[in-house]
Image (tube, rainbow, N blue to C red):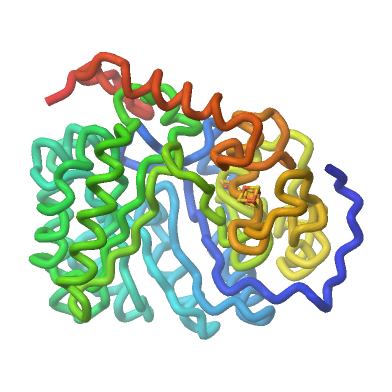
């Protein structure tokens, strides 16, 4: 892999979406937290004015959607101002939130500021289970209240649910809950066991049988709920034949800006030690997207090794996930080891088999909280 690839900028389309990680602060303590292990401190976060400049640059270069995310974005006191700034640039604003930190007054101010859409995370279908998984008592009840405000204001709602060994069998009830809350879309993402989640791998990794049943449930519900509820499903890839096109292809559709302004091709890109990342405090978003070495390292298909290089699927899955290749193969330019064509596929199966064989019911290791026994 080389960081000196010269980009042909004319052939690179602008990003469609930007994930604005406003903060890493979060009141929840999920055992599968996807924030990096090394969190950005509040004092290092971009200011309101700096984010507003980033939103203007994003809109000028052709970004259509901004996802206001975290951590928990409501932990930013200036969330209403940030939403107004993004909306004023003509960006479609999507708030990705746990709901914790929102009040009715604050939510109404967000709507007034131009908020277009909300993705509300749900950790389980009962308060006891959801609050145990999130490590936050009372969280589920508050989320249900927030969903009610969203419904009343007519803002479109998507329910986000990370599914894992302890809640994946509740999918039918999760679909019913999403309908009851007035959601138009449900995003079911199977847990990624990287970063913090590795500490809970044996408690979180769904079994192959669970993954198979979940796929069947999703397919059935998509048929029966056509026109009522859209279900996006990210299956667990440890049991798949081919990997998913992570990020829709590196540097192809979207970019992430972390709380300190570092611009990333994906949320886990900093786990690839050979890459260096640039910051909106030093360079424009446009400069970083088109000319940044990290973005060009795995853009397109030229960087690929065999078997990806000569594979008929290389423009479908883009060789899978670079961060997963780094984590398992120790080489970010390797074929995603989940792929059946990868020489490391057997190692992936061993990892999955060892994880699902672990005794169940062990306390979860929470992000920033003491462990709690399963309930
Ligand atoms: Fe995708 Fe590479 Fe596997 Fe082909 S060999 S299916 S391009 S990961
Ligand atoms: Fe980084 Fe998949 S998470 S490329």
Picture layout, residue 89 above or below residue 232: below
Q: Residue at x 52, y 61 (%)?
A: 19
Q: Residue at x 21, y 81 (%)?
A: 227
Total count of labels: 0
Picture layout, residue 17 above or below residue 10: above
Q: Locate residue 51 relative to residue 162 in the image: left or right.
A: right
Across and down, in percent, residue 15 comes to 63, 71
Across and down, in percent, residue 85 comes to 50, 75
When asked about the image quadrant of residue 329, the answer is: top right
Viewport quadrant of the N terminus: top right
Camera-side residue of 188 and 219:
219
Picture layout, residue 313 above or below residue 338: below
When asked about the image quadrant of residue 313, the answer is: bottom right
Camera-side residue of 75 and 297:
297
Across and down, in percent, residue 63 comes to 59, 76
The answer to whether residue 198 is visible is: yes
Across and down, in percent, residue 286 comes to 74, 70
Viewport quadrant of the C terminus: top left
Q: Residue at x 31, y 16 (%)?
A: 358
Q: Locate residue 345 relative to residue 140 in the image: left or right.
A: right
Q: Residue at x 54, y 79 (%)?
A: 64
Camera-side residue of 165 and 335:
335
Q: Locate residue 197 relative to residue 123 in the image: left or right.
A: right
The answer to whether residue 101 is visible is: no
């Amino acid at each position: 892999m080389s960081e000196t690839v010269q980009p042909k900028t004319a052939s690179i389309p602008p990003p469609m979406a930007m994930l604005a990680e406003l903060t890493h602060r979060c009141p929840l303590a999920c055992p599968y937290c996807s924030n990096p292990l090394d969190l950005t401190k509040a004092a290092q976060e971009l200011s309101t004015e700096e984010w507003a400049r980033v939103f203007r640059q994003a809109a000028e270069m052709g970004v259509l959607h901004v996802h206001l995310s975290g951590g928990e974005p409501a932990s930013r006191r200036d969330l209403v101002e940030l939403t107004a700034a993004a909306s004023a640039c003509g960006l479609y604003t999507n708030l990705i939130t746990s709901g914790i930190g929102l009040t009715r007054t604050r939510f109404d101010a967000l709507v007034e500021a131009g908020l277009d859409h909300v993705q509300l995370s749900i950790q389980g279908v009962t308060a006891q289970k959801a609050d145990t998984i999130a490590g936050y008592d009372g969280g589920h009840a508050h989320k249900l209240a927030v969903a009610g405000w969203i419904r009343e204001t007519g803002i479109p709602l998507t329910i986000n649910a990370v599914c894992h060994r302890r809640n994946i069998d509740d999918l039918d009830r999760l679909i019913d809950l999403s309908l009851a809350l007035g959601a138009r879309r449900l995003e079911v993402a199977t847990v990624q066991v990287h970063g913090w989640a590795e500490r809970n791998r044996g408690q979180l990794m769904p079994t192959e049988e669970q993954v198979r049943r979940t796929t069947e449930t999703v397919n059935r519900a998509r048929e029966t709920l056509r026109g009522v509820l859209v279900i996006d499903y990210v299956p667990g890839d440890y049991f798949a034949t081919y990997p998913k096109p992570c990020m829709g292809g590196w540097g192809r559709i979207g970019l992430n800006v972390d709380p300190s302004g570092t611009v990333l091709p994906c949320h886990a890109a900093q786990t690839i030690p050979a890459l260096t990342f640039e910051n909106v405090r030093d360079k424009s978003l446009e400069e970083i997207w088109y000319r940044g070495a990290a973005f060009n390292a795995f853009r397109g298909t030229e960087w690929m090794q065999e078997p990806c290089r000569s594979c008929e699927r290389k423009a479908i899955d883009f060789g899978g996930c670079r961060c997963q290749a780094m984590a398992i193969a120790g080489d970010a330019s390797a074929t995603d080891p989940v792929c059946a064509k990868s020489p490391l596929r057997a190692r992936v199966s061993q990892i999955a088999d060892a994880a699902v064989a672990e005794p169940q019911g062990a306390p979860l290791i929470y992000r920033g909280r003491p462990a709690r026994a399963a309930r």
